[in-house]
Amino acid sequence: MQISELARQASVSVHALRHYERLGLIRPHRRANGYRDYPASVKREVVFIAMSRQLGFALPQIARRLADYRAGTLGIDDMVRALQERADALAEQIRQLQAQKQVVLDHQAWLQAQQPRKRETARTWPRVRPRATVEPPSPTPPPGKTP
């Protein structure tokens, strides 16, 4: 099957398939016209790769397990162990991100404490223009009368 058909059936992009090929994860045959020709069995491998990527496994990790997957020797215990390791790695990453978030919030609180209050700002900051002195208007006599 051609690359576009494989991409559609496996729900991945053509770009991803070309990337997997460059990394040696999948190996298509070449037709006389140079087009890639994928056997139907590659679809299972691409789905395995795509699902592993969705779970957050890196391509080098996937490459190590792909040979066992192809040979049919990747057992359930192996997959469960790999998934537990991934879950542990995610838990550690979450712990690190929560610690980093707390540092950010601490910095935010410190910066907010440095801001002057609005009332203090009015007293502290000098005026750009001096205030105009306003004299009270002098009383004007009604029209027709002179003082």
Image (cartoon, rainbow, N blue to C red):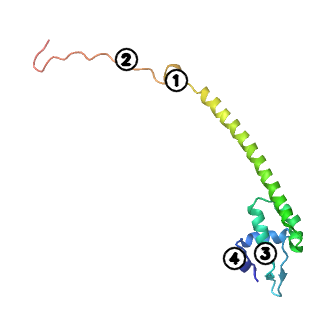
What is the number of callouts on the image? 4
**Quick one: label 3, few (<14), some, or many (20+) residues within 10 Å?**
few
- Kindly indicate the quadrant of the structure image that contains residue 58: bottom right
Height in image: 18 above or below 129?
below
Height in image: 118 above or below 36?
above
Which is more toward the observer, 77 or 111?
77
On the image, numbered disc 1 is attached to which residue? 121
**Quick one: label 4, few (<14), some, or many (20+) residues within 10 Å?**
few
Height in image: 32 above or below 119?
below
Left or right position of 139 against 127: left
On the image, numbered disc 4 is attached to which residue? 8
Distance Cα–Cα, label 1 vs label 4: 63 Å
Mark 1, mark 2: which one is toward the viewer?
1
Comes first in the chain, label 2 or label 3: 3
Instruction: Find numbered disc 3 in the image and state the secondary structure of the residue it sits on.
Output: helix
On the image, numbered disc 2 is attached to which residue? 133
In the rendered image, the quadrant that contains the C terminus is top left
Residue drawn at (75%, 69%) of the image: 16
Comes first in the chain, label 3 or label 1: 3
- The amino acid on which the numbered mark 1 sits, given as a three-letter code, is Thr
Distance Cα–Cα, label 2 vs label 3: 86 Å
Comes first in the chain, label 2 or label 4: 4
Are the residues flagged by discs 3 and 4 in contact, CB closer than 8 Å? no
